[in-house]
C-alpha cells in the first residue's frame, strides 16, 4: 500500500499553510509542516 503525499509550494504569504490545512482536513491526512527554525534559507 502506498502512502499519498501532496506538496504545496509557492512564495511567502500566498496561503500555502491555509491550503494545506484544508487539504489535510478534507482528506483526513496528517499535515507535515516545514521546520522553519532549521531551514538556513
Image (cartoon, rainbow, N blue to C red):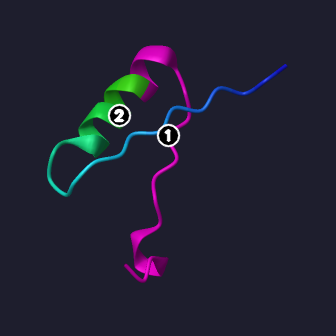
Residue furthest to the left: 13
| Segment tinted magenta in the rendering | 24-41
Q: Is residue 33 magenta?
A: yes
Quadrant housing residue 12: bottom left
Tell me where residue 19 appears, x and y as whole percent. Answer: 29, 32
For the stretch drawn in magenta, what is the main secondary structure?
Answer: loop
Residue furthest to the right: 1
Residue 41 left/right relative to 13:
right
Residue for badge 1: 31
Q: Is residue 21 magenta?
A: no
Q: Secondary structure at mark 2?
A: helix
For disc 2, the neighbor class at 10 Å (few under 14, some 14 to 19, many from 20) is some
Q: CA distance from mark 2 to mark 1?
A: 7 Å
Quadrant containing the N terminus in the rendered view: top right
Q: Given contact means CB atoms under 8 Å apart, are the residues at marks 2 and 1 in contact?
A: yes
Q: Name the residue nearer the viewer: 11 or 4.
A: 11
Vertical order, 10 against 39 (above or below): above
Tell me where residue 7 appears, x and y as whole percent. Answer: 47, 39
The structure residue drawn at horizontal position 48% and vertical position 79%, both measured from the top left corner, is 38
The structure residue drawn at horizontal position 79% and vertical position 24%, both measured from the top left corner, is 2
Vertical order, 19 against 25 (above or below): below
Tell me where residue 27 appears, x and y as whole percent. Answer: 49, 16
Vertical order, 33 against 2 (above or below): below
Quadrant containing the C terminus in the rendered view: bottom left
Quadrant housing residue 25: top left
Count every numbered label the image shows and give the total.
Answer: 2
Quadrant housing residue 3: top right
The structure residue drawn at horizontal position 35% and vertical position 46%, both measured from the top left corner, is 9
Residue 11's tag is none
Q: Name the residue nearer the viewer: 14 or 27.
A: 14
Vertical order, 8 against 13 (above or below): above
Residue 21's tag is 2
Amino acid at each position: 500500500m502506498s502512502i499519498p503525499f501532496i506538496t504545496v509550494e509557492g512564495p511567502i504569504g500566498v496561503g500555502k499553510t491555509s491550503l494545506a490545512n484544508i487539504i489535510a482536513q478534507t482528506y483526513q491526512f496528517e499535515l507535515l509542516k516545514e521546520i522553519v527554525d532549521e531551514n538556513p534559507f
